[in-house]
Amino acid sequence: MKKILLILATMLGLAVAASAQPKAVGIRFGYAGLGLGEISYEHYYSLFGNAEDFIEGELGLWGNSGFKVSGLYNWTLWHPDWTDQGTWGLYAGPGAALGYTTYHDDNDELKGSPFLGLVAQVGLEYNFWFPLQLSLDLRPTLGWAGRLDPNWFVMALSARYAF
């Protein structure tokens, strides 16, 4: 019984701590030879002692008939003081991506393949004084989808509702 109460108390404590952290949800649009649009979620989380670091996850369309899931850990590197209202932030971090895509092989045959990749990201974000966050990032991905992915470098613009 004590173990069950301890587990429940720990779960409740983690839920309260997670709900107290700032979050943002929105969309991320980029172009890399193929159309790319994703649902984006950020959750501020301090893994290494900086309360402004965040975990980012995306789920979206990839190309004409594929999907991709990405997860990243971003360190906030710098907060320039460029404006009186709102805040700027420069961030960077590593991550991973997986999904499924179709492509044309050397014989122009349509092939389908799972995708697995390593991701890096560097970006600049602006948090308005109202609950809107805009960011522009560069996200190179080294991945394999039946062949080396030719669309490895993506620049994207994100708009998120911050809460």
Image: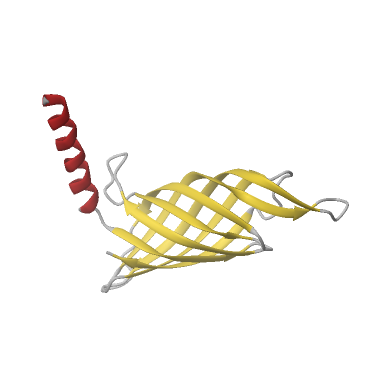
**Count the marks: how many?**
0
- Closer to us: 98 or 21: 98
Q: Position of residue 133 (x, y in %)?
A: 36, 68
Q: Is residue 132 above or below residue 111?
A: below
Residue at point 39%, 57% (across, down): 41
The colour scheme applied to this rendered structure is secondary structure
Query: In the image, 134: left or right of 49?
Result: right
Q: Residue at x 49, y 56 (%)?
A: 59
Q: Residue at x 86, y 50 (%)?
A: 106
Q: Which of the 4 quarters of the picture holds residue 142?
A: top right
Of 20 and 99, which appears nearest the observer? 99
Residue at the far top: name it.
2
Q: Quadrant of the N terminus?
A: top left
For residue 130, what is the image quadrant? Answer: bottom left
Residue 23 image position (x, y, % from top left): 30, 58
Q: Residue 101 location in percent, x, y?
A: 66, 53
Whether residue 44 is situated above or below residue 117 in the rendered picture: below
Residue depicted at 46% across the width and 58% down the height:
123
- 115 left or right of 77? right
In this rendering, position of residue 86 left or right of residue 75 = left
The C terminus, quarter of image: bottom left
Residue sticking out furthest to the right: 107
Residue 161 image position (x, y, % from top left): 34, 68
